[in-house]
Amino acid sequence: MKISVIGAGYVGLVTGACLASMGNEVSLVEVDMRKVESINNNIFSIYEEGLPELMKGTDIVATTDYNVINGAGIIFICTGTPSNPDGSMSLEQIKQAAGEIGDLLRTRGDYCVVAVKSTVVPGTTDEVVIPILERSGKKAGRDFGVCMSPEFLREGRAVYDFMHPARVIIGEFDRRSGDTLLPLYEQFKAPILRTDIKTAEMIKLASNTFLANKISFINEIGNICKRMGIDVFEVAKGMALDERIGNKFLNAGVGFGGSCLPKDLRALIARATEYGYNPGILKEVLHLNDKQALIPVDLLKKHIPLNGATVGLLGLAFKPGTDDIRDSRAILVAGALLKEGASILAYDPMAANNFKNIFPEIKYSSIEDVMKSDAVVILTEWEEFSALDYRGKIVIDGRRINKAREARIYEGVCW
Ligand code: NAD
């Protein structure tokens, strides 16, 4: 199958590489010329395990030229949907992509399916994407198909997740649209749910906001446990024995970040509000998460005066295995520390360069130098942090690195 993927970020690049490795002829369309050049030279702007090897084995091409989608039977839209300043979802990249695809549909005689893979608020594909595509004079259902098939991959395990999905959701405009997409997914051993487009969009947002909810919930329990001298990890272990609860996303800590959970929460809150509904739980999940990130700063203040102190940050990426710092808790912690008059020494095995774009005033150094700071805050559970010598140090741990308990002064955010 000839496939085009629009947007070669985390999702687009991984989608393209995986579909190509499955024997499809894949082209990537990307507006960022630097990304295009680096992809074509096998240099990747993102870190994902297994991706370089996968790409080497394919003849995938990246280009800025939309003409490459002519002849593609399926066109996936994988552009970004970041937050607007008011929390609603920015659809600018999707609109632009749909406009370009529409221009090419105008002169196209054969049937193809446009499939939205980006996470979008319910109603986006029907109310925004299809009308833009139909400006071409072509009609959805009659001349081209439309699907919304959300992506559930996790950064750091993106290739594995794409190839081993827990489920596949196909939101279809009509039967023919879904039938065109189906063969791509049938080879995965995963349940496939075919549904309507709006439902598919909501399944993705509801899934992400539910996971966010689980994290803020266990953090809340953790904050209570810390005050009562109860180990929240032991509590979570006991809770997880109930299969209705499960053992995933029950690690208490400094909260969630990343390109998805915070932004999707904000987007669903904004969308619900547009419909006149006040989503109380969702708002509180977000509020708790932002408060949680600042707990390390309060804990530090108990042990050292921050004005003039040098604080070491261990971990800047929003989670291990990635260089992504979008909505990373480290951003909030660094901002608060600088406001308190502390200087920061920061270390991350992958994300330091990205962090530098936001905080050029911070000193980025080796892990050894960071360990010489007046106090250390652990914000990402990179494996190498479990091999450090913490003896004699002051450590505030946001991620439950057990080895760090050997520190002279050790405090977990909620243990
Ligand atoms: P990203 O910002 O890394 O990638 C988007 C890419 O699209 C960028 O490279 C950008 O330059 C490019 N782009 C923007 N406008 C374009 C246009 N008109 N034509 C061609 N390219 C264009 O974003 P991402 O992390 O890959 O996420 C993409 C979507 O997938 C988002 O909606 C996100 O919420 C969702 N998602 C992300 C993840 C994840 O873990 N990152 C997981 C599941 C779903």
Image: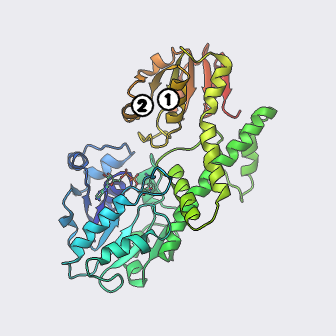
Q: Please determine whether, in this image, residue 80 is positioned above or below residue 97.
A: above
Q: Quadrant of the C terminus?
A: top right
Tell me the number on the disc at residue 349: 2
Ligand 1 occupies quarter:
bottom left
Query: Three-letter amino acid code at disc 2?
Result: Pro
Residue 341: percent from the left, percent from the top? 53, 19
1 and 2 marks in contact (CB < 8 Å): yes
Query: Front-most of 129 and 255?
Result: 129
Residue at the extreme bottom: 142
Q: Earlier in the sequence, mark 1 or mark 2?
A: 2
**For mark 1, what is the residue?**
384
Q: Please, what secondary structure does the residue beneath circle 1 have? A: helix
Query: Three-letter amino acid code at disc 1?
Result: Glu
**Residue pictured at 30% horizontal, 61% vertical:** 6
Q: Please determine whether, in this image, residue 41 is positioned above or below residue 412.
A: below
Q: Please determine whether, in this image, residue 113 is positioned above or below residue 267.
A: below
Residue 212: percent from the left, percent from the top? 60, 51
Q: Please, what secondary structure does the residue beneath circle 2 have? A: loop
Residue 205 visible in the picture: yes
Left or right relative to 322: residue 69: left
Residue 233: percent from the left, percent from the top? 71, 39
Query: Front-most of 345 and 123?
Result: 123
Left or right relative to 274: residue 365: left
Residue 279: percent from the left, percent from the top? 64, 60
Q: Quadrant of the N terminus?
A: bottom left
- Between the C-alphas of marks 1 and 2, the distance is 9 Å
**Residue pictured at 45% horizontal, 48% vertical:** 155
Q: How many labels sit on residues?
A: 2
